[in-house]
Image (cartoon, rainbow, N blue to C red):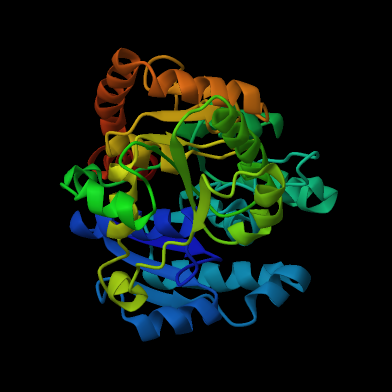
Amino acid sequence: MKIAFLAFTSLPKLGGAQIFTYNLIHYLLNQCHEIHLYLPRRYYNLISKLQINKSIKVKPILFMENSWVRFFPQILYFTLFIKQLIYRYDIWQVIGIFPAGFVSRKLSKKVPVVLRAHGDDIQKDEQLKYGLRLNKTLENKIQSTVHDVTSLVALTDTVSECYLELGIQKNKIIHIANATEIVRFQKQVNKNKIRNNLGVGNDEFMILSVGRYHKKKGYEGALIAAKILLEKGLKFKWIIIGKDLERLTPEKHKLGVEKVVSFHEDNSIDQKEEYRNMLKVPSDNLINYYKSSDLFVLPSLLETFGMVLIEAMSSGVPVITTDAPGCKDVVTHGFNGLIANKDDPISMSSNIYQILNDKILYNKLVANALIDVQKYDYSIVGNQYTDLYYSLIK
C-alpha cells in the first residue's frame, strides 16, 4: 500500500501521539508499505536535519500552516487534494482531530481517511479545564470532522464513548489500542545498582510513577497518599519521573514527604541517535527504572490510554491506578492490577499497602499482567491497522 500520514505535531516533541506515529510508521515500513509523512514545515525542517530514516518520505504540508488553519483552512485542504491527485495514495492515516483531521476530512470523498484521536482533541473535562471541545467553536469543527472521515480509531472504550457523544454511528468506530515493543522489556538489569543510584535503601520498597506534571495526572493526591503510607510505617521511596515536577516541590515539603518522594527527569535519551533509530521510547534508562521498582502507580484523574501502565506490566511490575477514564480501560481490578477511587489518597494508599504486604496477590497480578499485555505488542496492533486499511480500500 501507499499510505499518507498527516500530523500537525511531531519529533522532536516527545508525547503519545508523536511516539505512536513513528512507531506505527516503523512497523508499516517493515511490512514493505510505502509511507509519505506530511508535517507542518517547521517540523519538516527539524526532521530533515535529524535524518531519522531515509525510507520515510517526509514532506511539508505547505508553510505557515497554523495561520492557514485559522483563516483559510480550505487552502490546506486543496493542497492535500493536489497531493492525492499526484501520488494516488491508497489511504490517509490522520493523527489528531484538530487541526489535522479538520483540514483533511473532505479527502474522504476521494480516498479512505482513517482518523485517530489522541487526547485533548476528543476528551473534555470542565473541572480540569481540559480539552479543545470546551471551546464551542472548536467542538463544532471537531464534530463535523469526525462525521466526515471514513473511519475512527478508538484507543479505549472511553474514546469510543466520546465519539458517540458527537453522534457517530458505532460501525464507524474501530477499537485499536496503543502498543509497545514487549521484547524491549524482557532484558535483565542490575536492580541493586539502579535503586542505590536513586537513593532507595535495601529495606525499602520502590514505588514508581512516570509522567509529566499536569493537573490531570493526580500527583497532588499521590503526595497525600505518600504521607498516609509514611504514617503507617511503610518503608518506601516513591520515585516520580517526568517534566515540570518541580511545581510540586512546595506541596511535597508542606506535607513533609520530601524524604520519601523524589522527582527525576529521564535525560538519558541521546535524541539524535534515538531519532535515527526510529525513536526508542521509552528509553533504555526508563525501562531500567520500571524493572527495578516494586510497584508502579498511575494516580491520574483522566487519561486517553494509560501507556505507562502497559510499559510497567511488560516489565513484570504490578500496577495500581484509578477508576479514571483511560485507566480503567487498561486495568481490571484484582486481575492485572488494582484500581483505587480517583482523587482519593486514602483509597490509593490502602491499595498500595495491600499489594506490598500480600505476596500471593502481588505474584498473581504480575503473572496475569504479563500474559494480558501481549495483546498490546506492535506485532498485533500493527496488523490491526493494516487489516483496517485493506478493508477500506477493497
Q: Is residue 214 left or right of residue 156?
A: right
Location of the C terminus (image quadrant): top left
Residue 92 sits above or below residue 154 on the image = below
Q: Is residue 209 left or right of residue 218?
A: left
Q: Nearer the viewer, residue 213 or 206?
A: 206
Q: Nearer the viewer, residue 202 or 312?
A: 202
Quadrant of the rendered image containing residue 357? top left
Residue 91 pos. (x, y %)? 40, 54
Q: Is residue 12 left or right of residue 53?
A: right
Residue 85 sits above or below residue 253 on the image = below
Quadrant of the rendered image containing residue 169? top right
The answer to whether residue 177 of the structure is visible from this angle is no
Residue 92 sits above or below residue 74 on the image = above
Location of the N terminus (image quadrant): bottom left
Quadrant of the rendered image containing residue 25? bottom left
Residue 393 pos. (x, y %)? 36, 45
